Image (cartoon, rainbow, N blue to C red):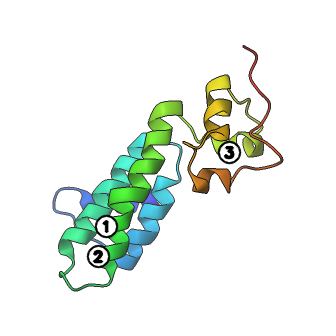
Amino acid sequence: CARALAGEAAGPGGQALPWPAAFFATTCLMHAEDVAAHEDAAALAQAALDALPPESAGRELLSAQLDAHLPEHTAVLRRFGRYPHRNAVYGRATTPDEAAWLASDECPGWAKSQMGGPGPGPAAAA
């Protein structure tokens, strides 16, 4: 499990994972609808990044995870408590705030590209 790997690798006395494994686990964790998993992802990626020599090919990928992808995903969870673009797939009602965000330019392309079905899911009763 990615959470167990993150805890072992980033915890006290832990050993950083090789960067490909850290990248894979970080990607899994940042797609969880759980801010704590995102925090684990950040610690895991940072530990792997810190262990890499400056010329390593993995530095660019891990840096992108830490500096762009992970914070953008985490911001959505902090705002809504879930990924609104998954509402239709999970049969969840979409709140008016989520619907407005999903229809806006603020909604990132990765979220729009993953919306299940023809729209963001049924609107919640106001």
Q: CA distance from mark 3 to mark 2?
A: 30 Å
Query: In the current view of this chain or complex, which residue is farthest to the top?
Result: 126
Q: Which mark is residue 86?
A: 3
Dot 2 falls on a residue whose secondary structure is: helix
Q: Quadrant of residue 63?
A: bottom left
Residue 13 percent location from the top left of the image: 16, 62
Looking at the picture, which amino acid does disc 1 mark?
Answer: Ser
Q: Quadrant of residue 68?
A: bottom left
Please, is residue 103 above or below residue 58 in the view? Answer: above
Residue nearest the observer in this picture, 5 or 56: 56
Q: Which mark is residue 63?
A: 1
Report the number of discs: 3
Dot 3 falls on a residue whose secondary structure is: helix
Residue 122 seen in this snapshot: yes
Looking at the picture, which amino acid does disc 3 mark?
Answer: Arg
Q: CA distance from mark 1 to mark 2?
A: 6 Å
* Circle 3 residues within 10 Å: few <14, some 14–19, many ≥20: some
